[in-house]
Image (cartoon, grey):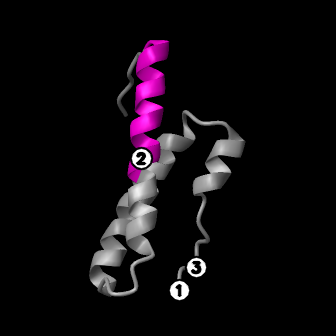
Amino acid sequence: MLGFLFNERECRELDYVLRKELDEMLFDLKDEEMNAELKSAIESRYNVVFRMYARLASPKEISRYARNRIYQ
């Protein structure tokens, strides 16, 4: 377990970076031509980044990026 101390500006920047990363991964996951192995790797990374984002964001903002556990 690591701990970090951020000031307000750094928190906003981290929030922005995580949101942009989540947006990009969601876009990639919608690609029908992507193979299953690559999608699985992106989903795994998405879960890690989403948990990081969930520590900073409000429940309303989190719900925007929440995904169903069963992905088809």
> Looking at the image, which residue is at 63% across and 53% down?
64
Q: How far from the left and from the top, in percent, is residue 37?
A: 28, 82
User: Which SS type dominates the magenta stretch?
Assistant: helix
Residue 5: image quadrant is top left
Q: Secondary structure at mark 2?
A: helix
Identify the residue position indicated by label 1 in the image. 72
Which one is in front, 23 or 68?
A: 23
Name which of mark 3 and mark 2 comes first in the sequence: 2
**Quarter where residue 42 is shown:** bottom left
Going by the numbered disc 1, the residue's amino acid type is: Gln
Residues at marks 3 and 2, CA–CA distance in whole angstroms: 23 Å
What's the mark number on residue 20? 2
Residue 10 falls inside the magenta stretch: yes
- The magenta stretch is 7-21
Q: Name the amino acid type tagged 3.
A: Ile
In the image, what residue occupies the spot 42% across and 47% down? 20
Q: Secondary structure at mark 1?
A: loop
- Disc nearer the start of the sequence (2/1): 2
From the image, state whether disc 2 or disc 1 is nearer to you: 2
Tell me how many marks there are.
Answer: 3
Q: Are marks 3 and 1 in contact (CB under 8 Å)?
A: yes
Coordinates of residue 2 in the picture (x, y in percent): 35, 29
Label ID, residue 10: none
Q: Distance from label 3 to label 1 (Cα)?
A: 7 Å
